[in-house]
Image (spheres, rainbow, N blue to C red):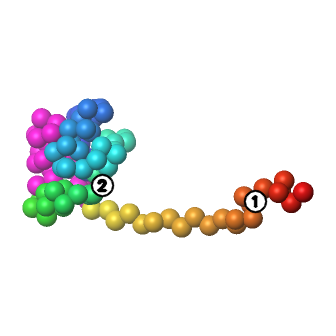
Amino acid sequence: MKISGVHLNRPDLHNIAAELGIGTRDVLTKDGILTIYNTSEVCQEIIDDNALASFVSMALNISAEDISDIKEVIEEPVKIEFDPSDFEDDEDDE
């Protein structure tokens, strides 16, 4: 979601996490875009009730109209490929 006219700081992110019942590591901001990882049943209920903007606006003491572009994004896992032999210690061979 995008939040206009507000510079978010760490306490703001902690307040949002507390309102949504999620960990502080699950709320991130970059370039005016707030990312919230849905990691709790409470957060899921809020989303199901279409109340996410209201809860975030209450946590930040701003108007819900300042929040726009709310999009659900499903994170896709990235497969990391590597060759385990690259990590073997050559000294063991001696």
Q: Is residue 65 visible?
A: no
For the residue labelled by badge 1, is the local secondary structure a helix, a strand or a loop?
loop
**Left or right of 56, for residue 37:** right
For the residue labelled by badge 2, is the local secondary structure a helix, a strand or a loop?
loop
Residue density around tag 2, few if under 14, some if 14–19, many if 20 or more, within 10 Å: some
**Left or right of 83, for residue 26:** left
Query: In the picture shown, does residue 23 fall above or below 10?
Result: below
Q: Which residue is at the front of the view, 51 or 67?
A: 51
Q: Is residue 57 magenta?
A: yes
Residue density around tag 1, few if under 14, some if 14–19, many if 20 or more, within 10 Å: few
Q: Which residue is mark 2?
A: 37
Q: Is residue 78 visible?
A: yes
| Rendering coords of residue 84 (x, y %) | 70, 65
Residue pictured at 30% horizontal, 43% vertical: 24
**Left or right of 18, for residue 92:** right
Q: Which residue is at the front of the view, 21 or 54?
A: 21
Q: Which residue is mark 1?
A: 88
Q: Which range of residues does the magenta coloring cover?
A: 51-71
Query: In the picture shown, does residue 93 fall above or below 62?
Result: below
Residue pictured at 32% horizontal, 49% vertical: 26
| Rendering coords of residue 43 (x, y %) | 19, 56
Residue pictured at 70% horizontal, 66% vertical: 83
| Rendering coords of residue 70 (x, y %) | 23, 55
> How many marks overall?
2
